[in-house]
Amino acid sequence: MDKTSTLEKSSPIVVGLDIGTTKICAIVGRRSKNGKIEVLGIGKAESAGVTRGMVSNIDKTVQGIAIAVDVAGTQSNVEIKVVNVGIAGQHIKSLQHRGLITRRDMSNEISRKDIDKLVEDMYNLVMPPGEEIIHVLPQEFTVDNEPGIKDPIGMAGVRLEANFHIISGQVTAIKNIVKCVNKAGLQSEELTLEPLASSESVLSDEEKEAGVVLVDIGGGTTDVAIFHEGIIRHTAVIPFGGNSVTEDIREGCSVMRNIAEQLKVRFGSALADENKENEIVCVPGLRGREPKEISVKNLAFVIQARMEEIVEHVYYEIKSSGYEKKLIAGIVITGGGAQLKHLAQLVEFVTGLDCRVGYPNEHLAKNEALPKNIYEELQSPTFATGIGLLIKGIQKMEYNDYVPANEDIKVEKTRYTEDKKFGLLGKLLESGKRFIKDDIKDEDFLK
């Protein structure tokens, strides 16, 4: 039993739940001995109850969550009760705010409790009716009018100020996601903005320091997150994604939706000029009708028009953030839509910034127990958000274990994790419930 508890302590098991527009994905994993993420199981289900990142049908979403979690739990041999859930959707907004506290006890150095108090004050901001704060992310701190401090803990000072990046969403949309998770018999550990999760799995610390834009092209939404000097600077959610492209193909080529999806995946391209004039795809006709011939170049024209619109939206967000000239690392595209051929070239052409496709494979440790095809599938950009949610959950649990026992901190009120690379306080805990490892039943699996 001692052996089990030691292993539990060193590598807590976490579940990331990505409730997307096209798929619901549950990933079970923990940190391996070499510091990477070891995936123990993965479950996928069709997402029929989510539209543009928001729940539109409770029952269908609950059914999808239950299927995905059941498959992941069976594969990993873990009883899943607590999950880390991603949130996206057009309702997501972000704003900058400045907060300050004046410390009464000048003899003591600035502690984590001072930071927590400053963060708690931000959660009390008056938001427009129907909106709720999801994340409060500290950026730079100022101690006694000394600006640009990334980590003030241990410093002496009376006046502690900070710039905050605050992310909010609709109360109803947040409650609907939590309700779906609860109805599936699960508990939501915390809600994490999906582009923040994706950034954990596909961006390097060097890129975040240099300045980079993460563009996560999902089925229903395209999520944008801008980093500079290791700090999140701007977030946005664009209400277009891969499904918009599929709908355009359906209408432009007059085919059924499932055929349009297959055409996009197998023959689609984001640049029409890269395709030859004489390439033709033959599509089966409806019952009793002749097969239909579709030009691959015409198909690319339809796709390019929509992808250009999405990239223009992204470029607008980059310009409005004020960091357009500071993005040394350019743009990283990820998500299912990033697998479209020639998309990186289109992004570079429209924005003038370097672009690469982000794969979550650099954070993954090979698990021999997983079938080879599943391990290879996990390295696809499609699973960037799910693996990112897993990483965020593991970071949170490791931080909670790290909290010194002699510090008077109430765990249920702490909303803070630590970015160890930069010592930056941020990525706050949205909920204080303890870890999924407390719910693991199969002790033999952990021995």
Image (tube, rainbow, N blue to C red):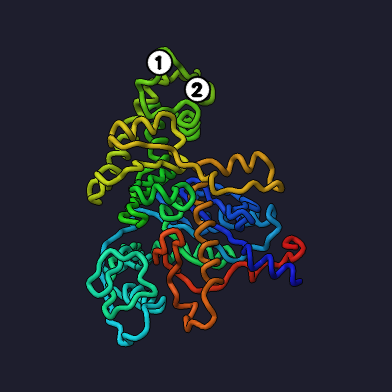
Residue 135 in the image: above or below residue 224: below
| 80 with respect to 85 (left or right) | right
The image quarter in which residue 66 lies: bottom right
The three-letter amino acid code for the residue at tag 2 is Val
Q: Residues within 10 Å of mark 2 (few under 14, many from 20)?
A: some
Q: Is residue 126 visible?
A: no
**Residue 59 percent location from the top left of the image:** 52, 58
The three-letter amino acid code for the residue at tag 1 is Lys
Residue displayed at 47% across by 84% down: 408
Residue displayed at 66% across by 57% down: 73
**Residue 203 percent location from the top left of the image:** 44, 48
User: Which residue is labeled 2 in the image?
Assistant: 283
Q: Quadrant of the C terminus?
A: bottom right
The image quarter in which residue 186 lies: bottom right
- Counting residues from the N terminus, which is met first, the one under dot 2 or under dot 1? 1
| 176 with respect to 146 (left or right) | right
**Residue 108 percent location from the top left of the image:** 37, 84
Q: Nearer the viewer, mark 2 or mark 1?
A: 1
Q: In whole angstroms, how far apart are the C-alphas of marks 2 and 1?
A: 18 Å
**SS at mark 1?**
loop
**Residue 175 percent location from the top left of the image:** 43, 66
User: Which residue is labeled 1 in the image?
Assistant: 276
